[in-house]
Amino acid sequence: MSRRFDHYMILTRSNPRKVLLLASEDGQGYIVPEWEPAPDAWIQLAARVTNAFASEQLGLPVTLLETRPGDLVKANGRRIKAYFLEGHDPDWQPPEGSLWAGPCELENINLAVPEMKPLFQNWLDGPPENEPDQPPAPGWVQSGWLDEVEGWTKEQLAGQGVRLTGGPEQLKSWSISCVLRFPTYHGDYFFKATPQVFQQEPFFTAFLAEHFPNIMARLAAIDSERGWMLMPDFKANEIRDIGDIRLWEEAARRYGLFQVAALGLTGALLEKGCRDRRLDRLGAQFEAVANDTARLVPDSEAGLTQEELKKLRDLIPVIKAQIAELDAFGLPDSVIHGDLNVNNIALTKTGEFIFYDWTDLSISHPFFDLDAMLEWGSPFEKEIPDWQKRVRNAYLEAWTDFLPMPELVRAFELSAQLAIMVQALNYHWIVTRIEKSGRWEFENEAPYYFRRLLNFQQ
């Protein structure tokens, strides 16, 4: 099945659900705006780019509700990716010759791209009934949700003497979060919503900020029941854009010191529902996931092969032995961020490092966190070939009260293999718990990390 997509923008309205179809210039059927994003664009994570294109094409402000891929392959070998949009101008009028189509209209019209019809039909049918023990769709895929958020944000800020100067700009939208920017007279504020599976992120973020205000973003308001949080702009640069390795070393060092200082909080976090990846549980968790064939072979292209599945299951006793070997070093489990890549670390103008986006927070072996930071590369990797070793050593300095540096290095080298496995477990955890229509965004991540694990172990 092709992994290349043609991208289409679909304006919607609710009550009843309809999609806007435009008349084609050649009269060969109805169309919707099509665009070609940059090859390396991750559209859901840059919703403002999607929205800007659609707004220009349609002539009204829009926000992205959700993105859905089609199953059918077009004659050009590409599949369809559909971006369902909500308009935000009650006085806007559609172009001449266009049609608001519901299920009945869709049955009796010609589409210039007939492969789009199943996607239209699926969306028009409305959200599916919740499966047993499965969460509902996130709020931001529903029409009218943005107005609710704007009202809540306005109320929260007004209580702090802060006034909005305009409406929200949608920055990011996918199955596990939606991020908005609100302009105010006191600078920008950022709003983040999470689905039910990550509903505790605002609470955990506030909990850590209370104990470690120097490395956490300051929160203006949270709504734990809805998974909402609001924070002022902390005016910082992501370290991925900083070409000074000394600052990367300092970021790693401070993060290690934070983990040491957080050792006394692990029990409280576990009691409050923090994900448990402690070493004494990790072997059984890996064995269970390694035997979940359905999730590890989501499709024939990106899923694991039968040979890879066998190799993965053959690793079960090896991984358990490595976990026991790592545990023998005697280092305590601590708070781990779970996705400590360079997009989630920022340096403020006052020289403070902010670690944010705690969606994947868990309690586990502390060394697992550095894999993401070292995996993504750096702006100075050509000039400083041993940059990963330097950043690693800076991080390990925080742990020298527990073991001498040579022992820490040996423990870290062993943990690097297991860190890849933990990433696979985290993505498996996500894809089995988010709402069904959003799983496609993550279904290939666990196979990817398990394939990395197999290569590493070889």
Image (cartoon, helix red, strand yellow):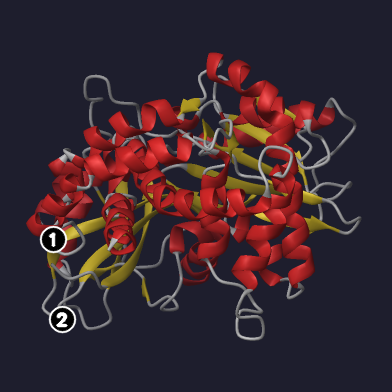
For mark 1, what is the residue?
A: 109
* Residue drawn at 70 percent across, 30 percent down: 262
Q: Can you give x and y, in whole percent of width and height, for residue 117 in the image?
A: 16, 57
* Residue drawn at 29 percent across, 53 percent down: 450
In the picture, residue 196 is in which quadrant? Answer: top left
Q: Can you give x and y, in whole percent of width and height, for residue 418 in the image?
A: 40, 47
Nearer the observer, 446 or 330: 330
- Please give left or right for residue 441 compared with residue 183 in the image: left
Quarter holding the N terminus?
bottom left
Q: Which amino acid does the dot numbered 2 rest on?
A: Asn
Residue 76 in view (yes/no):
yes
For mark 2, what is the residue?
A: 76
Q: Which amino acid does the dot numbered 1 rest on?
A: Ile
Q: Can you give x and y, in whole percent of width and height, for residue 211 in the image?
A: 78, 27
SS type, badge 2:
loop
* Marked residue nearer the N-terminal end (2 or 1): 2
Residue 62 in view (yes/no):
no
* Residue drawn at 91 percent across, 55 percent down: 350
Neighbours of disc 1 within 10 Å: few (<14), some (14-19), many (20+): few
Neighbours of disc 2 within 10 Å: few (<14), some (14-19), many (20+): few
Q: Which mark is residue 434?
A: none
